[in-house]
Image (spheres, coloured by chain):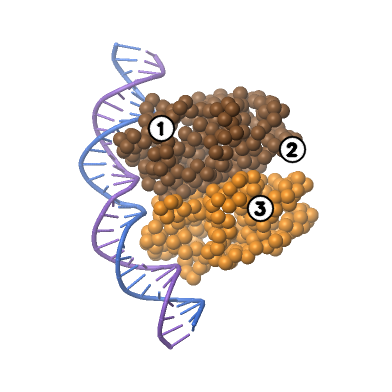
Chain colours: A orange, B brown, C purple, D blue
DNA sequence: GGCGGGACTTCACACAGGTGAGCGCCGGCC
DNA sequence: GGCCGGCGCTCACCTGTGTGAAGTCCCGCC
């Protein structure tokens, strides 16, 4: 059930069989959500940490006048925010993009786990730090990259994140994001996203069709995006995972 | 020495005298930096957690072609990243804006503290969550706000953060940021920042002169920025701090 | 197998913000 | 007390991206 999370954490550290069993033990109280459903709303009181098993979701904020910004995407194996329950209320919302299957980890379970399993705790800290780094990189993306670079960067990031958990097939992966959502994530309009995708397709940078993304030449896409993967803090392409790669 | 951090944490929870003494005990190995000096560089291996006692600093990234984005500002009482030392290398740099005085907290000290002082630990988690929320808000700022709104939002945020640690004087605070730095933080050019500041001054939203910011009407500035302070997760304007406000 | 709605695509036009350059002020330094 | 460099400020012009609207495609549903 939790193989995506485990596989991701193993990019940072080796986990013992016991560690893995403990993590697997988290998977009670599974929650299912339909596309478009809110997982949590602004103003709600966070009670547990959400862990995504399957499906994609987005974290977003909406300004009073309707302008919307997606602040991050969740893919399988992602954790919401370690310790969110410390906060009194959510300052943003999270919505399912595709059908989503997630585990709600109660605070006591999480705290107990962090109390007793130092290796897992360190791995979860790593996860937290990487998420912060991703958020910072998005800041750079929105602040200083052009439309084409922004989109290329997002494609690179998501492709590599998915590859790290084994959800790519060669140079292809699922990509269930609409152009409107891409616009809300990159600070553009859907019209301009459309124009720019056209340009990227013409340049042979991506093939994007039927909720599937193909990256014919990752190096070229990286270059177009000024993409530097260091902020994901993966051990060089999962070197120590080569056994089961 | 650490009153800014303590004052900030007390917006989240009451700390015992013992807790405060423990925090004060952190202040060894103080480091001094000149304006412009790098506190840590991209590629460096983080060895300890930096805690800012005095002065302002910025976290930034530079693209290959020189475009620069400031991803956050550090003010007194701010912590760099709890547990950074878990990562092998920095994915960005941090530079002093003014003369900076900071404490380098070694990993063992920090881990020991988090082992023995649950209340402090919870407060530090809160700090971490708030920093993540600030980073997300910057994403919204860059993605969906206009130039004037972005600047107004930044002024609101910094004013309120400074007020939370007692570094405002009425509706005035220190503001040692150049227009170029403002541009790098808001994803604009310095020319356009200048234009926009002119407009904001004309509208009576701010008085900015000689490294000092005055906010004649915070409510008006908030409105202009579409600013919602919920993401800072401060107890309503330091309600429980009223004793020493 | 037709209908409806969401997603994608395109167009003509508008404007926020970028570009490159130049000037003046001010404070630090020899 | 003069020089120098950083910062603030302005200008004329340019362009990347937004706006509003409309048409098409495709898939799920009755």
Q: Position of residue C7 (x, y in %)?
A: 45, 67
> Which structural element holds mark 2?
helix
User: From this viewpoint, which residue is outermost toward the right?
Assistant: A18
> Which structural element holds mark 3?
strand
> What's the CA distance linking mark 3 and mark 1?
39 Å
Q: Position of residue A159 (x, y in %)?
A: 54, 59
Q: Are there few (<14), some (14-19), or many (20+) residues within 10 Å of tag 1?
A: many
Q: Position of residue D2 (x, y in %)?
A: 29, 15
Task: From the viewer's side, name the closer residue of B181 and A65.
Answer: A65
Give the mark nearer the N terminus: 2 vs 1. 2
Tags 2 and 3 touching, CB below 8 Å = no
- Quadrant for the C terminus of chain B, please: top right
At 70% across and 50% down in the image, what residue appears?
Answer: A107
Q: Which residue is mark 1?
A: B215
Mark 2 or 1, which is nearer the eye?
1
The number of discs equals 3
Query: Mark 1, chain letter?
Result: B
> What's the CA distance linking mark 2 and mark 3?
22 Å
Q: Which mark is residue B115?
A: 2
Q: Which mark is residue A48?
A: 3
Residue A165 in sight here: no
Task: From the viewer's side, name the closer residue of B106 and A33.
Answer: A33
At 72% across and 28% down in the image, what residue appears?
Answer: B18
Is residue A29 shown left or right of residue D26?
right
Query: Mark 2, chain letter?
Result: B
Q: Are there few (<14), some (14-19), or many (20+) residues within 10 Å of tag 2?
A: few
Tags 3 and 1 touching, CB below 8 Å = no
Tags 2 and 1 touching, CB below 8 Å = no
């Amino acid at each position: 059930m939790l193989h995506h999370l485990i596989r991701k954490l193993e990019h940072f550290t080796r986990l013992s069989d016991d560690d893995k069993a403990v993590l697997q033990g988290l998977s009670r109280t599974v929650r299912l959500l339909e596309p478009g459903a809110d997982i949590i709303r602004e103003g709600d009181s966070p009670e547990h940490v959400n862990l995504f098993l399957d499906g994609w979701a987005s974290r977003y904020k909406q300004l009073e006048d309707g302008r919307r910004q997606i602040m991050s995407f969740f893919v399988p194996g992602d954790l919401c925010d370690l310790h969110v329950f410390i906060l009194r209320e959510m300052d943003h919302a999270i919505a399912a993009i595709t059908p989503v299957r997630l585990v709600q980890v109660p605070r006591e379970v999480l705290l107990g786990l962090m109390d007793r399993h130092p290796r897992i705790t360190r791995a979860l800290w790593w996860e937290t730090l990487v998420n912060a780094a991703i958020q910072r990189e998005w800041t750079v993306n929105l602040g200083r990259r052009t439309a084409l670079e922004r989109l290329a960067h997002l494609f690179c990031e998501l492709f590599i994140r998915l590859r790290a958990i084994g959800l790519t097939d060669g140079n292809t992966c699922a990509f269930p994001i609409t152009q409107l959502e891409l616009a809300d994530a990159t600070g553009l309009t859907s019209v301009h996203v459309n124009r720019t995708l056209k340009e990227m397709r013409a340049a042979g940078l991506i093939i994007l069709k039927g909720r599937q993304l193909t990256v014919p030449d990752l190096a070229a896409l990286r270059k177009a995006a000024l993409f530097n993967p260091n902020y994901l803090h993966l051990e060089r392409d999962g070197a120590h995972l080569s056994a089961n790669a």
